[in-house]
Amino acid sequence: MKFFLDENIPFSVTDIIKRLNFKAEHTINVGLRGATDKEIANYAKKTGAILITKDLDFGSTLSYPKDSHYGLLILRLPSYFNTKQISNAIKDFLEKIDPKILIGAITVLEIGKYRARHL
């Protein structure tokens, strides 16, 4: 399974995901720093990656209908969370779930819980 991290996700999360035996890329690695949301969504879909972002706009099915992404993980964590807290939240989540549930779904991760909506 592959993950693509939006620019608003700390770069160091890439290494955390790789240590869990997943593939991971960050917008910085692929030359998409400053890219539009559409460009980021298109890249993630084209590469078959689950997009991890804090950007709630990606959750809009009007702007991003069913076939516009491979899977989406939106972080709704407190704004005061630092890099370590964000990393731990993602790590704990990926260790507890079957990552296949992320494919074709919009998943929202909050503190201690998540909800997934399959499209």
Image (spheres, helix red, strand yellow):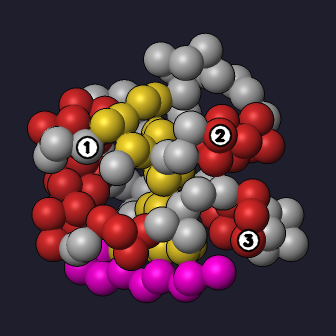
Mark 1 → mark 3, Cα distance in angstroms: 24 Å
Residue 25 sits in quarter: top left
Q: Residues within 10 Å of mark 1 (few under 14, many from 20)?
A: some
Q: Which residues are magenta?
A: 111-119
Q: Earlier in the sequence, mark 2 or mark 1?
A: 1
| Residue plotted at (59% across, 42% down) | 44
Give how far across and how far down residue 87 sits, in percent. Answer: 24, 47
Amino acid of disc 1:
Phe
Q: Earlier in the sequence, mark 1 or mark 3?
A: 1
Q: Is residue 51 above or below residue 14?
A: below
Amino acid of disc 2:
Lys
The residue at which mark 3 appears reads as: 66
Residue 60 appears anywhere in the view: no
Question: Could you tell me what secondary structure mostly forms the magenta stretch?
Answer: strand
In front: 74, or 4?
4
> At numbered mark 3, what does the secondary structure look like: helix, strand or loop?
helix
The residue at which mark 1 appears reads as: 22
The residue at which mark 2 appears reads as: 46
Left/right of residue 100 with respect to residue 30 in the rendered view:
left
Q: Earlier in the sequence, mark 3 or mark 2?
A: 2
Give how far across and how far down residue 8 sits, in percent. Answer: 52, 40
Give how far across and how far down residue 45 sits, in percent. Answer: 64, 47
Q: Residues within 10 Å of mark 2 (few under 14, many from 20)?
A: few
In front: 39, or 84?
39
Mark 3 → mark 2, Cα distance in angstroms: 14 Å
Residue 19 appears anywhere in the view: yes
Residue 51 got which mark? Answer: none
